[in-house]
Amino acid sequence: MQLQGKVALVTGASRGIGRAVAVQLARDGARVYCTSTRPGGCADTLAAVAALPAGCGRAEALVADVTEPAAAEALAVAVLDRAGRLDLLVNNAGITRDSLFLRMTPEDFDVVVGTNLRGAFLVCKAFARSMARARGGRIVNIGSVVGLTGNAGQANYAASKAGLIGLSKSLAQELAGRGITVNVVAPGFIATDMTAVLAPEVKQAMLAQIPLQRFGEPEDVARVVSFLCSDAAAYVTGQTLVVDGGMTM
């Protein structure tokens, strides 16, 4: 229960890594606010938290489109009105629109960068001032190994995740004096709905590149996020922790 009494926000918490992170933070004692873009989107997440043993944290769902400045600000108002503060911020909301570069439209590029990078910027901005006043907090941005390596067919996604690393390092420098740490967790191939649509031969080729010889589970990422949110990581900031079974080693 290393996060007992903490207040957390996880964007994009309706499924996959976001859901696993929300459940893990609640398991570790945090009060968790979960966002999705539609009412009822986090129902399964709330049910999973409700099924945790007695004494764990609880969860509440909020609807927010993190690509809109007004929505990000309204999200901050809602959380601060309900809880009075925010201790832990996890920016997980993200999308893909994969296409080879020569076929990629400007719209495909803009919408991915707008959600994955601009959305994280807007949410961080909405909460940074209250965290700074409290002189403490944890921000964890969910990146991807493709932000480090690039990937054919994902120029937009890779650019957004590479930009997220740069954003996080800059924020880590600016906010350190207020006791706020900012880090990135970069998952590799994780078994989620986003990766389930890949062709079997693509999955097999990727598996061959993973020294641990298995695909990751959302919980593998969630436990690392919980560590970065805890007091055990109080001296860790500006870092990118790769969770990929050794794939990019």
Image (spheres, helix red, strand yellow):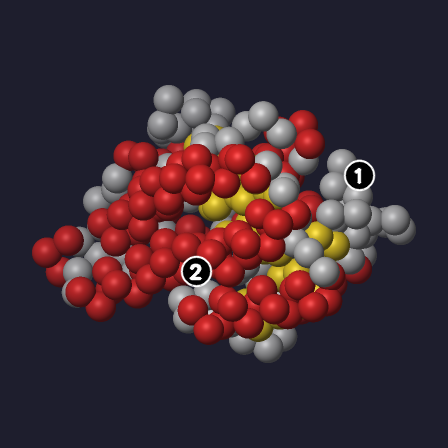
Quadrant where the image shows the C terminus? top left
**For mark 2, what is the residue?**
122
Quadrant where the image shows the N terminus? top right
Q: Nearer the viewer, residue 81 or 97?
A: 81
Report how far apart the C-alphas of labels 1 and 2 lie in the structure: 30 Å
Q: Residue at x 69, y 32 (%)?
A: 231
Q: Residue at x 42, y 71 (%)?
A: 68
Mark yes or no: residue 204 visible: no
Say which amino acid is labelled 1. Met
Disc 1 crowd, CA 10 A, few/some/many (<14, 14-19, 20+): some
87 with respect to 183 (left or right): right
Q: Nearer the viewer, residue 147 or 188?
A: 147
Say which amino acid is labelled 2. Leu
Mark yes or no: residue 109 visible: yes
Q: Residue at x 22, y 49 (%)?
A: 155
Q: Secondary structure at mark 2?
A: helix
Q: Which mark is residue 1?
A: 1
Q: Earlier in the sequence, mark 1 or mark 2?
A: 1
Query: Given this view, does label 1 or label 2 mark the residue nearer the observer?
Result: 2
Residue occupying the far left of the picture: 102
121 with respect to 91 (left or right): left
Q: Residue at x 57, y 39 (%)?
A: 178
Q: Are marks 1 and 2 in contact (CB under 8 Å)?
A: no
Q: Secondary structure at mark 1?
A: loop
181 with respect to 58 (left or right): left
Residue 247 % position (x, y): 39, 28
138 with respect to 83 (left or right): left
Q: Nearer the viewer, residue 147 or 173?
A: 173
Residue 78 % position (x, y): 64, 70
